Image: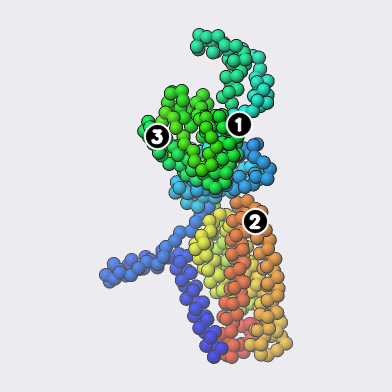
Amino acid sequence: MRKKKVHITIVIIFILAVLAGLFDYPQYFNSGVDFLNQKLNWNLPHFWEVSFKLGLDLQGGTHLIYEADLSNVDEKDKAGKMEVLRDIIERRVNWYGVAEPVIQIQGGNRLVVELAGVKDIGEAIKMIGETPYLEFREVLSEEEKQEAMKSISDEEVSEAIEIFKQTTGQEISREELLEALVSRLFKPTELTGEYLKKAEISFNQTTHEPQVSLQFKEEGIKLFGEITARNVGKPLAIFLDGKSMIDTDGDGEITDNDLYAPIVQEKISKGEAVITGEMDIVRAKEIVKRLNWGALPLKIGEPISQQVIGPTLGTVSLEKSLKAGIIGFLALILFLIIFYRLPGLLASLTLAIYVGLVLSLFKLIPVTLTLAGIGGFVLSLGMAVDANILIFSRMREELKTQENFSRALEEGFRRAWPSIRDGNFTTLIVALILFGFGTSFIKGFAFTLSIGILISMFSAIFISQNFLRCFVKTRWEKWRWLWTPPAHRP
């Protein structure tokens, strides 16, 4: 009965292996299906085709590094703000259809953006830069106004007075000029686009002009209520990307000269605001679209580092990686067969199944493969070989002391298991630490290594053991030369 169970298990393993192989590389199978359908007029379906997700270094693309402005953010809030910034930009590039973007925080205030397949660096920068930064600003206090006036030099005041006289033909005193300049200064509040729930077009019921209605999230409602309560009778400015959202000087462009600062009439507790002014429906739609794409909680300017990786370099890297993997795999098979005879041949078959299963998981999850990730996979292949070597070495020792092949087999697996378990789990712990604290490429290495380790333990203990159990109580178990070289026989 036990023998029958082993045979059923092996059949299931081979079926799983065949399915994994077809899933990994279905082209040949589907070509055969096309041939039969054409020759015999059949209608056989293709096997499921899913492509591997290749990272920036294998596929080519754009690598950008941005630096966020955290100068006005409390220390305790910096990490949270950076997380929100990353999530919003990731949603933004996903909307553009970029496959598998990698967007990660580096250090305390840097954001690494990797866009595989995007070769136009100008397009990539525009894609990120168009994501707006919405903020509400309030007027300066009297003490802050006095400090601001002191910071303006006499030369700057004299120059401004002269420009004002030439432009308007009127005289203006120093005090009046300073007051006019300071009155247009605003300081940031806690309320930014991070707390925006949605924006939509509405129309003024009196003038029927288009306007933009804003609705805030629950946290934003509370902040908006606090800000409007302390600014009743004062202007509250709305800025997008550091500039006013309304073209108040009528020149057709939004510049730093423009200002939109409605007077707060009363505390607003419902978390709703309206942006009005001289805007047409096209401009209103543009503002709504950009806000709903995701307003950034922090300011980012031009990328401090930018790099384009061409597809040729990625193809060469991929070819070299595959070549190294194939050579390494064949060398392992040769080593196992020479030193371990039939168990080595069975281990080689187990490794082939292991490779098929791991690659299938890479497609199903899916895992974005990079050079570092491929390195982690190759290392896990070595861990899988190491487990088989431990098992076969223990089997040799047991076969020296007892004639019963079945008992030697079971004892070999039982005694090898603690070493396999400890070795793999310590490596897995290190891989998890690397994944938790590492950056982009380190995470890819750690993730593929972790998957490989888990599958290698399954293949070494379950698949290899069932393959060997097939030979229990057969004539093969009596041919000791198949299991151990002469130097290891009793």
- The circle drawn on residue 293 is none
Residue at the spot 49% in from the left edge and 62% down from the top edge: 363
Quarter of image, res 449: bottom right
**Marks 2 & 3, CB-CB < 8 Å contact:** no
Mark before the other along the chain sequence, 1 or 2: 1
Amino acid at pointer 3: Asn
Horizontal and vertical percent for residue 313?
A: 52, 48
Tell which of 9 and 257 is nearer to you: 257
Horizontal and vertical percent for residue 259?
A: 51, 27
Q: Is residue 43 left or right of residue 129?
A: left
Residue at the spot 59% in from the left edge and 77% down from the top edge: 462
Q: Is residue 231 left or right of residue 45?
A: right
Circle 3 sits on which residue?
Answer: 204
Quarter of image, res 446: bottom right
Circle 2 sits on which residue?
Answer: 436
Quarter of the rendering occupied by the N terminus: bottom right
Do we see residue 115 in this rendering? no
Q: Eyeballing the image, is 35 above or below 401?
A: above
Q: Residues within 10 Å of mark 2 (few under 14, many from 20)?
A: few
Tell which of 438 and 76 is nearer to you: 76
Helix, strand or loop at label 1? It is strand
Circle 1 sits on which residue?
Answer: 187
Residue at the spot 53% in from the left edge and 68% down from the top edge: 357
